[in-house]
């Protein structure tokens, strides 16, 4: 399984001309069946997609409907176990807590790849590889 970071979801809804290629790639990725997400990713998507300063901002209803549709994927819930693992990973890898929580949510879902533009492409975190799907 592959884990999807928030930026993939945000590109999937982008209507910006300069993000057309990334939007296409993101939509193709979300057609896959081997994907995992976390509650954190879905929360971040909601906050970013509905913020007032966003061009093409979504309504509460639109963002909620998309989140509901993405619940078809395997979802890692926010748990004490995840929080503790993320705290350890943040210290070990010198990551922000939120990035470490992405890595550790992927690990709990038994994903071997995190699809992300924000984390370092090609980086390994104890068996979890980060891949930037927009890199050519």
Image: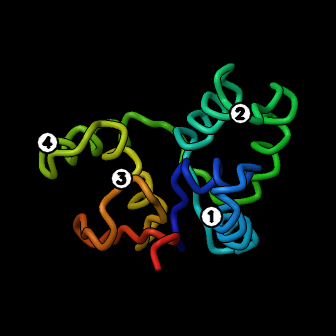
Report which residue position mark 2 lands on: 55
Q: Is residue 105 above or below residue 21?
A: above
Q: Quadrant of the N terminus?
A: bottom right
Q: From mark 1 to mark 2, how far is it between C-alphas? A: 16 Å
Q: Quadrant of residue 24?
A: bottom right
The mark that comes first in sequence, 1 or 3, is 1
Q: Quadrant of residue 117?
A: bottom left
Q: Nearer the viewer, mark 1 or mark 3?
A: 1
The mark that comes first in sequence, 1 or 2, is 1
Please state if 44 lies on the left or on the right of 61 as rendered: left
Q: Secondary structure at mark 4?
A: helix
Q: Secondary structure at mark 2?
A: loop
Report which residue position mark 4 lands on: 91
The mark that comes first in sequence, 3 or 4, is 4
Q: From mark 1 to mark 3, how far is it between C-alphas? A: 25 Å
The mark that comes first in sequence, 1 or 4, is 1
Q: From mark 1 to mark 4, how far is it between C-alphas? A: 32 Å
- From the top left corner, tell me how far across and down residue 115 is, in percent: 48, 65
Q: Secondary structure at mark 3?
A: helix
Report which residue position mark 1 lands on: 22
Q: Nearer the viewer, mark 1 or mark 4?
A: 1
Report which residue position mark 3 lands on: 104
- From the top left corner, tell me how far across and down residue 52 is, in percent: 68, 19
Q: Nearer the viewer, residue 94 or 81?
A: 94
Q: Secondary structure at mark 1?
A: helix
């Amino acid at each position: 399984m592959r884990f999807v970071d928030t930026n993939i979801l945000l590109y999937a809804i982008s209507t910006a001309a300069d993000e057309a290629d990334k939007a296409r790639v993101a939509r193709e990725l979300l057609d896959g069946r081997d994907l995992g997400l976390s509650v954190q990713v879905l929360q971040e998507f909601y906050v970013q997609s509905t913020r007032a300063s966003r061009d093409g901002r979504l309504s509460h209803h639109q963002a909620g409907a998309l989140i509901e549709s993405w619940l078809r994927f395997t979802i890692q819930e926010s748990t004490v176990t995840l929080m503790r693992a993320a705290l350890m990973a943040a210290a070990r890898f010198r990551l922000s807590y939120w990035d470490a929580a992405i890595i550790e949510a992927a690990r709990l879902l038994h994903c071997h790849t995190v699809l992300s533009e924000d984390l370092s492409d090609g980086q390994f975190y104890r068996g979890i590889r980060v891949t930037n799907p927009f890199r050519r």
